[in-house]
Image: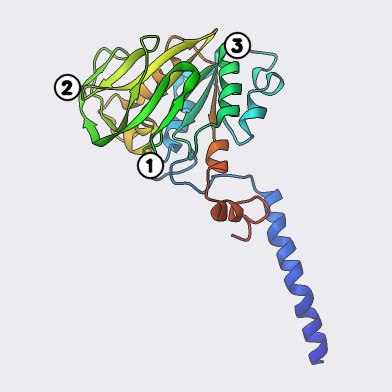
Amino acid sequence: MEHKKRSKLVWLWPAGLLLLVSLHFWFPKTGTGLRHDSYSTTAEGKKAFVYLLEDDPERANHRISRNRDPLAKLTSPDQFYGQKHSQNSKVLCLLGPARYPNKSEWKRLLKWVEAGGSLVIAAHDAKPEFEIEDLNISVKRIRGHIDADSDKIKTDLIDSGRLLWQSYARIIATHKARRIIQADGTTQAVVQTHGKGKVVVLATDFIFTNHSLAWADHSNAEVALLLLEVETKVRNVVIDESLNLSGTPKVVGLLLNPLFKPLT
């Protein structure tokens, strides 16, 4: 009798494990495990920005999506340009990624921009330093941080309204880049034409965060939307999560792997 009970227990564990793993195929994949991704509802998360894009009546015909595939696949003509819309109606958003593109990825991204795409990349405050060598644009950390209100902010994106800006870095760029946001005497956002497309660089991802968009009496939400359409009208907005997935620490990344995520 006791032997039969043990036999049942031996089979019960593999059956339970199989059931947990199969949950991955029943429920959609969401989140990257990071507090600042576009799925997160924390202060530094960007879920409110996704809702803002989806609910904005002026962008009712826009296609809003997240990307979890490698950038090499996303920027290939077959996958990203599509047949119905020209590439100059698309904007790819790298909003405070856990890691920045490597040389190979930058090469593909800039080639895609050169063909007419729009790229918006914002530094993540936790490590706000990266460089786009081909455009001579770099983001450098500053001593202390910037916490500026409208009287210390200069921008041509809006004519009136209150704007709040927080940052731990500044942008260094050549005259080819047009300054579109300055705060406390530092350059915080620039736009630069590259081929048929353009690149918008921000020294911080603050403007896109849930924290930033929480103030209804400020113009942060309006500015966040306008940053996607500087000098270009877009109809297809893609928010990248692939750099958050690949930038997650290895141990955490393993636990969030699709195979192990149900067990985690």
Badge 2 amino acid: Asp
Mark number for residue 161?
none
Q: Disc 3 on helix, strand or loop?
A: loop
Tell me which residue sits at (42%, 41%) in the image: 45
Residue 76 percent across, percent down from the top left: 67, 22
Tell me which residue sits at (40%, 36%) in the image: 124
Query: What residue did someone put label 3 on?
Result: 115
Mark number for residue 126?
1
Q: Quadrant of the C terminus?
A: bottom right
Q: Disc 2 on helix, strand or loop?
A: helix
Q: Residue furthest top?
A: 196
Q: Is residue 228 visible?
A: no
In front here: 233 or 63?
A: 233
Badge 1 amino acid: Ala
Real-space Cα distance between discs 1 and 2?
Answer: 26 Å
Compared across the picture, whether 245 is left or right of 187 comes to right
Q: Quadrant of the N terminus?
A: bottom right
Residue 196 percent across, percent down from the top left: 55, 7
Mark number for residue 151?
2
At label 3, counting other C-alpha atoms closer than 10 Å, the crowd grade (few under 14, some 14-19, many 20 or more) is: some
CB-based contact (under 8 Å), mark 1 and mark 2: no
Instruction: Give residue 85's quadrant in the image.
Output: top right
